[in-house]
Amino acid sequence: MNQQCKVAIVGYGGMGGHHADHLLELEAFDVAGIRDIRDSQQDLARNKGLHVYAELEDVLADETVDVVLIATPNHIHKEIAVKAMRAGKDVICEKPATMNSREMEEIIEVEKETGRRFVVNQNRRWDEDYLVVKKLHDEQTIGEIFNVECRVHGSRGIPGDWRQQKEFGGGMLLDWGVHLVDRVLLMFNEKVSHVYCKLNHVRNNEVDDGFKMTLTFESGRTAFLEVGTYNYINLPLWYVNGTRGSAVIHDWSMKGEVVHLETDEQKDAVPITAGAGLTKTMAPRRDDGTVRHLPLPRVDSHINEFYLNVKESIEGTADILVKNEEVLQVMRLLEAAFESDASGQTVAIENKVGV
Ligand code: NAD
């Protein structure tokens, strides 16, 4: 490879533009140019001083290009990736890598056959909110985590054009679900035994404009994952239950807290009036020292690690962080989620999914 890794971006829309801006800030990378089918995007790139390739074939024939970065709508990721690897290019591909697990298996085959790298931009593994929850899990700060809930809420429906259509791989399960599932599988490092999913079609009958999914892991712990695009009041981004406490992260500004159980000593709860009744079980804890309120831990992370890891893994100096076997497991799990929605039943995974 060149000292600088030269990247050609195919699909110069929202995310393609974001990648270009980012890569140009990194010394280890250069942007060779872009390919987009729309004139407007070609003009935008030219105005930014970027080279514009007329056709995909011109990208693939350019010997100075090391990596093809695919940021097109989802339905053509596989086709472009296969062509690029066969042309001797390594590939960075946007998520969801493919439309289904069969396509992902095909990509893994071509990767083996050509010896090229295919790496998926699971960038939300570098989100601080996720890394804080993972830290709570890894360090057992609130004991054994037996339930996590992650909710991503918006109120504007599905944005844009292709995301609203099935043939292009639209819908929120493929869009955000792929991130949320990827992260909990990585965090718990445990097989999923069951998945239940209900897709929402608030205003879009063709694809889901949100979903609610419960993953049950072999140990019995659960992950509840929710995406909503018609939520005018947001629930917290994360709500986490451990055997010795709870944690909440309200939003991406990292507002939230940890409540830690300090002692197992039982002090008598005082019943409270709740609605039309009385409860002792649900009475809030008094300020009796049995729990402590802590700030959320913070985690330093930067998405640059992803790009640099791709370069280093191509050069053979690092193991790849986003592994294709993990991507394949997520695709299989999303298929189980679609199956659950169609049948209205919980789907047993039978060792097909999990790491
Ligand atoms: P977008 O619609 O803004 O951009 C897609 C671009 O691809 C458009 O400019 C379109 O003209 C172009 N295009 C379509 N077909 C093409 C082809 N055959 N050859 C070349 N260009 C083509 O969409 P977006 O929001 O940028 O999403 C693109 C991809 O990035 C999707 O896979 C999406 O899931 C992913 N994405 C990832 C993240 C993330 O955080 N990882 C965020 C947003 C989008």
Image (tube, rainbow, N blue to C red):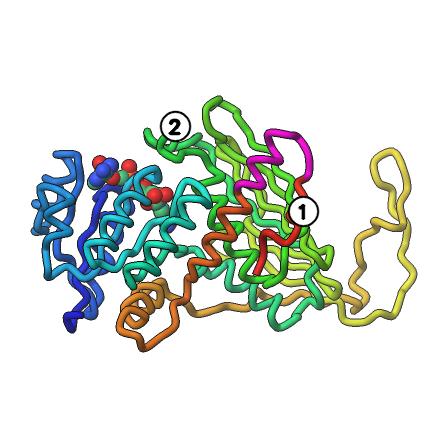
Q: Residues within 10 Å of mark 2 (few under 14, many from 20)?
A: some
How busy is the neighbourhood of tag 1: few (under 14 within 10 Å), some, or many (20 plus)? many
Left or right side of 145 for 272: right
Span highlighted in magenta in the image: 335-346
Residue 194, disc = 1
Nearer-the-camera pick, 354 or 140: 354
Measuring from the top left, give residue 75's x and y in whole percent.
Answer: 34, 37
Task: Give the main secondary structure, helix, strand or loop, of the magenta stretch.
Answer: helix
The residue lying at 71 percent from left, 68 percent from top is 143
In which quarter of the view is residue 292 placed?
bottom right
- In this rendering, the label closer to the viewer, 1 or 2: 1
Task: Say if disc 1 is inside 8 Å of ligand 1.
Answer: no
Ligand 1 occupies quarter: top left
Residue at 35% from the left image edge and 58% from the top image edge: 119
Describe the element under mark 1 as helix, strand or loop.
strand
Q: Which is more N-terminal, label 2 or label 1?
A: 2
Q: Secondary structure at mark 2?
A: loop
Residue at horizontal 67%, vertical 51%? 193
Work out whether 297 lies above or below 351: below
Q: Is residue 105 above or below residue 44?
A: below
